[in-house]
Image (spheres, rainbow, N blue to C red):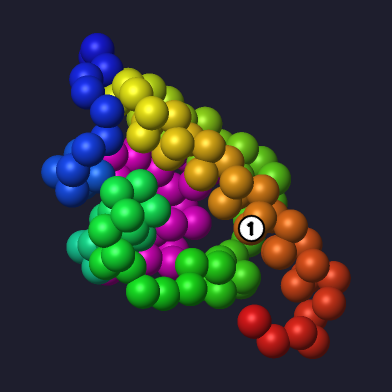
């Protein structure tokens, strides 16, 4: 598949999110964790992800939430974040090219780093409130 244009619209965000999460669901490491957590609520999760990435990449402020707290109780560590980042980057690279595509990968990397740091902190200090 040859990469197309940059990420410019909500339709592009939807393509990115739908393709990425289809890969997540098929992944041996990540699929079971997502399936256990999301169950049959994939449409709601995908909609939230559309709004999140629309806000982050397109600066169209449709997401209102706190992305970190839902992840605090998940059985995840560095290997999970590495796989998540690899799948995300592969998906972006296969579908898009350009400044926003580069920004999407950069932002995903920053989020993964921040989430890992915060997870480590809260696991070492379990009495803190998120």
Magenta stretch: includes residue 36: yes
Quadrant of the rendered image containing residue 68: bottom right
Please give left or right for residue 10 compared with residue 130 in the image. Answer: left
Q: Which residue corresponds to the image point at 25% horizontal and 44% vertical from the top-left?
A: 13
Please give left or right for residue 28 compared with residue 72 in the image. Answer: left
Residue toward you, 33 or 81: 81
Please give left or right for residue 120 compared with residue 26 in the image. Answer: right
Residue furthest right as drawn: 124
Where is residue 78 drawn, in percent x and y?
69, 45
Residue toward you, 47 or 98: 98
Q: In this view, does 114 lie above or below 126?
A: above
Q: In which quarter of the image is the N terminus?
A: top left
Where is residue 105 drawn, in percent x and y?
48, 35
Residue toward you, 98 or 116: 98
Q: Please name the predominant secondary structure of the magenta segment in the image.
A: helix
- The stretch of residues the image draws in magenta is 16-41
Q: Which residue corresponds to the image point at 57% horizontal and 51% vertical from the top-left?
A: 111
Residue furthest left as drawn: 11
Q: Which residue corresponds to the image point at 27% horizontal and 67% vertical from the top-left?
A: 62
Q: Residues within 10 Å of mark 1 (few under 14, many from 20)?
A: some
């Amino acid at each position: 598949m040859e990469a197309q244009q940059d990420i410019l619209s909500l339709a592009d965000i939807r393509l990115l999110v739908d393709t990425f999460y289809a890969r997540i669901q098929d992944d041996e490491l990540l699929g079971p964790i997502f399936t256990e957590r999301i169950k049959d609520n994939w449409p709601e999760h995908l909609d939230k992800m559309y709004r999140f990435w629309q806000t982050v990449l397109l600066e169209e402020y449709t997401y209102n939430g706190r992305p970190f707290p839902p992840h605090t109780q998940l059985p995840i560590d560095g290997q999970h974040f590495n796989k998540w980042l690899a799948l995300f980057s592969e998906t972006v690279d296969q579908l898009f090219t350009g400044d926003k595509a580069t920004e999407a990968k950069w932002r995903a990397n920053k989020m993964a780093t921040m989430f890992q740091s915060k997870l480590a902190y809260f696991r070492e200090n379990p009495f803190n409130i998120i």
